[in-house]
Image (tube, grey):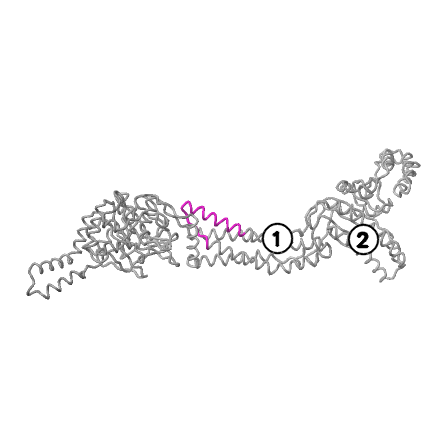
Amino acid sequence: MSKRLLPRNVPLLTAAVATVLALVVLSVRGDGLFARLEGTALDARFSLRGPRAPSTDKIVIVGLDDRTRDVAPEIFQTRNGWVTLLDRLTAQNPKVIALDFFFSSPEVVLPDDVAQHVRDATAHLATAEPSEAKTALAEVGHVLEADRLLADAVARSKRVFLGAFLHVTGTRATSTGPAPVALVAAQHGDVADASGGGDLRPLTASAASYTMDSIAQGAVGAGVVNVLDDPDGVKRRMPLAVEYAGQYYMPLGLAVALAERGKSGDTRYVAGDDHLVAGGQTIALSKTASIVLDPMGRDRIPHVSAADVWNGTVPKGALDGKLVFLGYTFAAYDKVATPLDARADGVELHATLAENILSERVLVLRGGKTTMLATIALCLVVIAAQLRRIRRRAWIPPLLALAAIATYAAIAYVVFTHGTIIAIAAPCILSGLVLVAATIGGLATEGREKAQLRAVFSQYVSRAVVDRLVADPARAKLGGERKELTVLFSDIRGFSLFSEGMQPEKLATLLADYLTPMTELVLESGGTLDKYIGDAVMAIWGAPIDTTDHATRACEVALRMQEVLVQLNAEWRGQDRPEITIGIGLNTGAMAVGNMGSAARFDYTVLGDQVNLASRLEALTKEYGVAILVGEATARAAAKDFVFREIDLVRVKGRAGAAPVFELVGRDGKVATDPRFAAALAAYRARRFEDARDGFAAIPDDRAAAILAKRCEVLTRSPPPADWDGVYEQRSK
């Protein structure tokens, strides 16, 4: 098809440009633009997988829950309550007691009952008994000693890990001397800083909250309790290193996991690296030296109420040898959102980290280059779907693109189940936007392209065929291709003679009245009108829409043309119009079909030797006095529905080889051939010309037989040379 008909591939170009823009957006905005959506996509994977059981039974959460507030309120009010709880918890023989809180300042407030006792004793000091005053002072002394008593309880336990919180405000703290005792135990073991790493570098804190040194002296370990907040508020990540005053600190969950392995403090870390080695285990790090937690879901980690510890009602052995995380779990405090629980207890995050590390279920987050490559791959699929050989129907490109996106999402889920997280939102959204851009580009030109196709092909094919071409423009196969088709030529005999005496207007009207029904027969059969050549009609079947029965359709049209012509002649006898006859030639074979014109003019046609043979067959109808002649391939293809008889072996003009020609006699079951014709033809080819002459002459009312009888008469009188091959040389075109 000409350039004017088919514009440049706008959807392909649009998709390519949109891909470049998408990659620019991804490289400039990166994770920030898609952070919320990536978080949602990750949550969807967790939800699809569902909750899971812990991979170890070593971890237990002892919760300061609502029942504890009722049973032992002094835990929430005084340090002495903590002393009692720690002693009773230690008596359960856990391996580690990790505190998800800290004691950052001394206790200075007297309990109400002690304060009232002191006031009463003071008011009646003159009359009070010395023993009462001593008792009041002893109570005060006990309260004032609460911090020391708590320090003694921590030291006595020999298994307490303290929590600390580092305040990340965007500014860097400078070292002011030795690190606090509570933080020293949380420091990574072997640390270096090459001043590189980009967004892999850990967070930097400007201040810290931690347990005061007097209490922290007896602790055996410590860790920070920082958790990273995603933009949507869901807690998904935990930093494995945070920098404060030139030192690097590990989280509480990691510290507990190392203690369980007997490798406390055994870490090697280079700030900015993509991994950290803890107790011999290499842990891949992502942005801000963090990992994505693999949550288990609500109530999957065993919980024990601190009230049961206080009352001594904990089942025997429930905490023996366990890694206990002690934290607040009552209804209105320290609640966080996780992918599997919108109101999880904050202490669960630290327990989850310990479980992930101990079970080596640490998720690996692939970002940056992986996201870029995935986006490029999906966008390339969208671009490839816009190629004309693929974009045969409007729904194919989006279907392929959506299938690719869905496949990628499925792959992302499969690799997630094996411990690797790859981005879904950025690749899928950006490739989806590229698809939208390509679709809009296609819609912007599709209407014009279809209108042009409809305008051009409606002149040559039926409306039904045009509709199929418009729905699938690629069927036009523009530019030419080799296909097996059937071609028809028809011509009015003696047209030049009777047209000489007619007025041009009457001649034009006559041609229109003749060509209109002939053309309708072609189009109604699903054929394509190739062109008019004066009074001649050229038509093809099998292109641009593929049909397997093109020879049968062409034969039916040829017979219908002769039948319609009989009706036309009957109508014209009373209109002072000449009676006309037509000859029709049909041939089937391989031809080149498509745009055989130039860039400036569209010409959808067929070319090839088989086309030329059909034209010569039409001319031969005059020489044999028959209405329709067909080639051997046509006769063979349509033999089931029509009756044919072989007329002769002819070497047509312009062809070196000889070809058998057949007359289309009629429809099968409606007509029959005279067997004497075939017998006479066999005698003719055997050089028994007298027998052939007599055989042809014996067939009445058969112009072809009469013509061949005359030829045999001539050959009888003047026999051909010995090398005669029985081939008739066509005299004219």
Q: Which amino acid does label 1 sit on?
A: Arg
Q: In this view, does 599 lie to the left or right of 144?
A: right
The answer, for residue 519, to whether it is visible in the render is yes
Left or right relative to 588: residue 451 = left
**Secondary structure that dominates the magenta span:** helix
Circle 1 crowding by C-alpha within 10 Å: few under 14, some 14–19, many from 20: some
Q: What amino acid is labelled 2 in the image?
A: Ala
Given the current orientation, which residue lies at the most extreme right position?
717
Q: Does the magenta stretch include residue 514?
A: no
- Vertical placement of residue 503 versus 292, above or below: below
- Between 649 and 435, the residue placed more toward the observer is 435
Residue 502 sits in which quadrant?
A: bottom right
Query: Whole-percent x and y of residue 476?
Result: 67, 52
Q: Is mark 1 on a helix, strand or loop?
A: loop
Residue 593 on image: x %, y %: 70, 49
**Between marks 2 and 1 in the image, the one whose residue lies nearer the viewer:** 1
**Residue 506, position in %: x, y?**
86, 61
Q: Can residue 263 be seen in this view?
A: no
Magenta residues, start to end = 401-425
Would you place residue 244 above or below residue 354 in this image? Answer: below
Q: Which of 645 and 643 is in front in this view?
A: 643
Q: Read off the residue under disc 1.
A: 393
Q: Name the residue under label 2.
A: 536
Residue neighbourhood size for the residue with mark 2, other residues' Cα within 10 Å, grouped as few (<14), some (14–19), many (≥20): some
Q: Residue at x 15, y 63 (%)?
A: 116
Residue 356 falls left or right of residue 125: right
Residue 82 vertical placement versus 728 (above, below): below
Q: Which image quadrant: the N terminus? A: bottom right
Q: What element carries label 2?
A: strand
First of labels 2, 1 by sequence position: 1
